[in-house]
Image (spheres, rainbow, N blue to C red):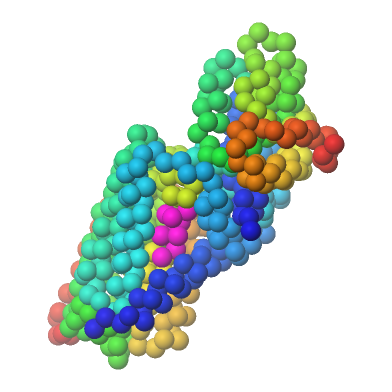
Amino acid sequence: MTYLSKSPWILHYDATSCNGCDIEVLASLTPMYDVERFGIINTGNPKHADIFVITGSVNEQNREVVRNLYEQMPNPKVVVAVGICACSGGVFRECYNVAGGIDKIIPVDVYVPGCAARPESIIDGIVTALGILEGKRKAPQSGATEQQPVELQQGGGAQ
Amino acid sequence: MISLVGVVAFILLAPVIGGLIAGIDRKITAHMQGRVGPPILQPFYDVGKLFEKEKTVANDTQRFYAISYFIFMIFTGALFFAGGDILLVIFALTLAQIFLVLGAYSANSPYSHIGAERELIQIMAYEPMIIIAAVGMYVVTKSFNIGTIASYPQPLVLFLPGIFAGFIYILTIKLRKSPFDISTSHHAHQEIVKGVTTEFSGPTLGLIEVTHWYETVFLLGFVYLFFAFSPLIGIIAVILVYLLELLIDNASARVKWQLVMKSSWVIAALVGGVNLAVLYYLGVG
């Protein structure tokens, strides 16, 4: 019996995002989409969180913050990169001041593209992350991600 | 006159009832906000999940304090439902709460410390009203023994309407509901991260959740005491009081700690004091 996938608590962090994706992440919590149906709660505290939802291309200022937040989360945990900036750096990829994607800093499990990512695809990404979370619980020794990261197509649905 | 049945029933049933209350609470809250809401059993999934997580503690004393909080809250509720001394119950409740504060202070985190300070403010805010409630029950029934108070033939609420209203007021603090959820809250974001529970994670946080279920059942038992003359009316009153708390929770925003502190003491002094004075002049007890 497992409860992990029935009660995923989210930590949401904005790493140099333009706020577009952040607003869509928060839109998922509104009565329109209501992710609490799935037991998803936005905790705002890394020590309570299971899923790290992160937006933006990460600049030099918050590189350490991202790593710190990731390390404070107790295992098992998954990382969902929301928006094309978080996936690859997007239009800011070549900029001198950005890392160009979350996976340059911490291991990412699910990529949700889009500019901005739609609430439907964010929810799809988080639900995909639940399966990976379950896999990590069964193989707790794997510190970094062993599964292949999942890339979502725009408009939802895993590849 | 300690009833062992009450003790065993409380220890076994309170987490089940408390968890269900928490689940129904979240469902009704969601409906009030126009959402579907999580399943009724969601609090059990949450706690099950927390016990599946990695054991990370800030330090060993933190876990000790969390376990002490758990044990003394069970002691409080067990003593209450066994029909023990109401003053001892109140002191045990305070002790349990202090262990939570110490647990939050033991971690080196500013959010945790602010949460602990606010928890202390909450304790100071609600304590006078709880003591006045116990004194009021003593004035009417001539006993601090909960068994005797519960078997009093007339409805206590008729003698203690002011004290009952004051108790409902501080119940909002105890159940961690808005507008008085200043130290931590079950809702999403707030300005001090998760306040007093910030540094607790995994199984330790699960233990604190279960403790909160025990606490809820104990507090609702205290509400029942005002209506103990008739079990049916008592249970209906408890349900109505909880629904009222939910309505207040969803209809109000969090206030500053100064207002929590001042208003709780003013209300305790006003309704509690006037109620006791009226009882004295009417010659009750």
Q: Can you give x and y, in whole percent of width and height, for residue A24 in the image? A: 69, 37
Tell me which residue sits at (72%, 10%) in the image.
A94
- Which picture quadrant has residue B159? bottom left
Q: Residue at x 38, y 76 (%)?
A: B8
Q: Is residue B208 magenta?
A: yes
Instruction: Tell me if residue B11 is in the magenta stretch.
Output: no
Question: Between residues A101 and B242, which one lies in front from this camera angle?
Answer: A101
Identity of the residue drawn at 71% across and 49% down: A33
Q: Is residue B3 left or right of residue B246?
A: left
Task: Find residue B236 and report its horizontal and vertical position in percent.
Answer: 47, 80
Q: Nearer the viewer, residue B117 or A65?
A: A65
Residue A123, picture quadrant: top right
Does residue B60 appear anywhere in the picture?
Answer: yes
Quarter of the image with the C terminus of chain A is: top right
Q: Is residue B220 visible?
A: no
Q: What percent of the width, then of the height, locates residue B224?
A: 38, 78
Boundaries of the magenta span = B206-214
Rendered view: A105 above or below B18: above
Q: Is residue A147 left or right of residue B239?
A: right
- Residue at 43% over, 49% down: B204
In this view, B168 is above or below B3: above
Residue B129 location (% of width, % of height) = 26, 64
Question: Which SS does the magenta portion mostly show?
Answer: helix
Q: Quadrant of the N terminus of chain A?
A: bottom right
Left or right: residue B224 compared with residue B133: right
